[in-house]
Image (cartoon, rainbow, N blue to C red):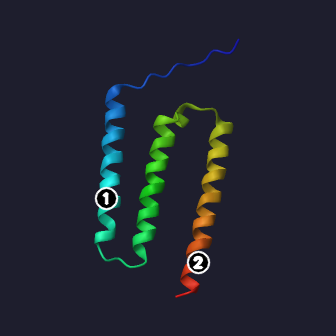
Amino acid sequence: MIMEEKHITGYDVYAKVMISLLILTTVTILVPWINLSALTVFIALFIATTKGGIVMIWFMHLKTEIMLIKIFVIFIILVYVSVILLTFSDYLMRL
């Protein structure tokens, strides 16, 4: 029989995660008001990726998953980053 280690996350951790997500959402809303031209989209995507990472780590419990699932998630993140980089390289070539 495999002994599974139980993990219990307190409400204070979820409250901190919620506050950080609300702060990042506020920053996402405020970024377009600052005139950063092409960097605006990059910053918005970076904040969205950070929020997605926070959700994956805490709400999807990836922090306590087995290594195989973590490897799959890392692979998916690499595919995501490569698609974003290809999109931005195409965008920069058109300027």
Residue 45, given in percent of the width and then of the height, sits at 46, 62
Does residue 53 appear left or right of residue 86 in this picture? left
Residue 18, given in percent of the width and then of the height, sits at 34, 40
Q: Secondary structure at mark 2?
A: helix
- Identify whether 67 is placed above or below 95: above
Residue at the spot of label 2: 89
Residue at the spot of label 1: 27
The amino acid on which the numbered mark 2 sits, given as a three-letter code, is Ser
How far apart marks 2 and 1 lie (CA) works out to 25 Å
| Residue at left offset 41%, top offset 74% | 39
Seen from the viewer's position, the closer of residues 53 and 32 is: 32
Characterize the local packing of mark 2: few (<14), some (14-19) or many (20 or more) Cα atoms within 10 angstroms.
few
The amino acid on which the numbered mark 1 sits, given as a three-letter code, is Val
- Identify whether 24 is placed above or below 11: below
Q: Quadrant of residue 62?
A: top right
Residue 72, given in percent of the width and then of the height, sits at 67, 45
Pick the quarter of the image with the N terminus.
top right
Task: Report the residue that reaches farthest toward the right.
Answer: 1
